[in-house]
Amino acid sequence: MDLRFDGKTIIVTGGGSGIGAATCMELAASGATVIVAGRTMQGVERVVKHIVDSGGQAHAVAVDVADAASVEAMVRFAVEKTGSLYGLVNNAGIFDFKFLEDMDEEFMERMHRGNLLSAVFMTQAVIPAMKKGRFGRIMNASSISSTLADIGLVAYAASKAGIDML
């Protein structure tokens, strides 16, 4: 099956490396205009260059997905730049290891904001554009750790379990 996304704008968070970068490249190869969103411009610009050099369309955006105002500004940019929004891939996340007895409130908050609240903020921000276009698709990347937590990954696993419920 050859999925085509011609004329469709899709935001990918965590798009500057790893699974996010690969997702951006595949979506662009399938005709999507990709908003490559990441923590720093260095990674996202590298992915955008690769997409553009391959004949695709993409825009680079630095965003702190754990900050609702930053997320709203990025989504506004995406809609202003492309005119509409078809999809969102919530891929950004934080992976960190710490034993339960060593976790403090700051660590737990960082994991929760970086993995779960970031997806909530992104989803809330794209809903108005998707409603306006009367269509939208949202994919949330989770982890096997959400059901099979390993030693030292309690905070990570709990935040990814929240993604599964989202």
Image (cartoon, rainbow, N blue to C red):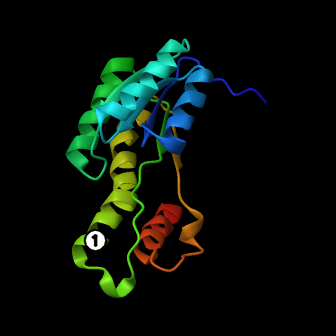
Q: Is residue 100 above or below residue 66?
A: below
How packed mark 1 is, by other alpha carbons closer than 10 Å (few <14, some 14-19, many 20 or more), is: some
- Quadrant of residue 74 within the rendered picture: top left
Amino acid bearing label 1? Phe
Residue 130 x %, y %: 44, 35
Q: Is residue 6 above or below residue 139?
A: above
Q: Which residue is located at x 55 percent, y 61 percent? A: 143
Q: From this viewpoint, is residue 132 visible?
A: no
Relative depth, front residue between 23 and 135: 23
Quadrant location, the N terminus: top right
Residue furthest bottom in the image: 101
Residue 64 x %, y %: 27, 45
In-image side of 142 versus 117 (left or right): right
Relative depth, front residue between 156 and 30: 156
In-image side of 135 versus 128 (left or right): right
Say what secondary structure mark 1 lies in: helix
Q: Which residue is located at x 39 percent, y 81 percent? A: 99
Q: Which residue is located at x 75 percent, y 26 percent? A: 2
Q: Which residue is mark 1?
A: 107
Relative depth, front residue between 153 and 8: 153
- Quadrant of residue 39 within the rendered picture: top left
- Quadrant of residue 59 within the rendered picture: top left
In-image side of 36 versus 53 (left or right): left
Q: Which residue is located at x 49 percent, y 21 percent? A: 50
Relative depth, front residue between 10 and 29: 29
Residue 52 x %, y %: 48, 15
Q: From this viewpoint, is residue 125 visible?
A: yes
